Image (cartoon, rainbow, N blue to C red):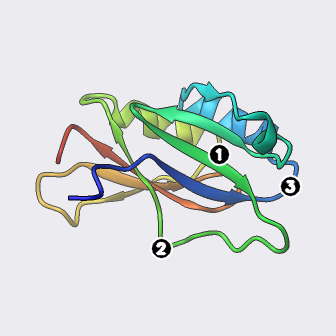
Amino acid sequence: MYVTGVDHVQLAAPAGCEEAARRFFGGVLGLPEIEKPPVLAARGGVWFGVGEQQLHVGILDGALVPARKAHPALRVARGRLDALAERLEAAGAPVEWDAAIAGVRRFFSADPWGNRIEFVEGTRR
């Protein structure tokens, strides 16, 4: 086998997004920021830790078209999904619950630029 896991997921954002990214991903979601290598830091954007993986917010040159279908699914600790939904709603982010998968609690939201993000409770593998 060649592929052994996911290293990171990147979401596109407009130039100048860094503070909004820090407020949303760092503040609302509580993800720790990861220092970017200097050569990449010059390009803008912000990186965050998500367990052993990373979420990168990268700058898109030109007009941003938010990803409305393709999306990361972030796992939330059992018993914390409702509280996270409340935090997102309080921050002005949309929360759309979905029961399409039997036995799986999840909802969809969006980052400040409209990119879709799924939040799934538990440790489903």
* Residue 114 at x, y percent in the picture: 64, 62
Local crowd at mark 3 within 10 Å, few (<14), some, or many (≥20)? some
Q: Quadrant of residue 38?
A: top right
- Furthest-left residue in this view: 103
Give the residue type that dot 3 points to.
Ala
Determine the residue positioned at 20% across, 38% down.
Answer: 123
Tag of residue 69: 2
Q: Earlier in the sequence, mark 3 or mark 2?
A: 3
Local crowd at mark 2 within 10 Å, few (<14), some, or many (≥20)? few
The residue that disc 3 covers is 15
Answer whether residue 122 is visible to the viewer in this image. Answer: yes
- Foreground mark, 2 or 1, reads 2
> In what element is the residue under mark 3?
loop
| Mark 2 in CB contact with mark 1 (< 8 angstroms) | no
Q: Earlier in the sequence, mark 1 or mark 3?
A: 3
User: Against 105, is 61 above or below?
Assistant: below
- Furthest-front residue in this view: 2
**CA–CA distance in space, label 3 to label 2:** 22 Å
The residue that disc 1 covers is 92
**CA–CA distance in space, label 1 to label 3:** 21 Å
Q: Earlier in the sequence, mark 2 or mark 1?
A: 2
Q: In this image, 45 relative to 106: left or right?
A: right
Tag of residue 9: none
> In what element is the residue under mark 2?
loop
Determine the residue positioned at 20% across, 58% down.
Answer: 1
**CA–CA distance in space, label 2 to label 1:** 21 Å
Determine the residue positioned at 66% across, 49% down.
Answer: 57
Local crowd at mark 1 within 10 Å, few (<14), some, or many (≥20)? few
Give the residue type that dot 1 points to.
Gly
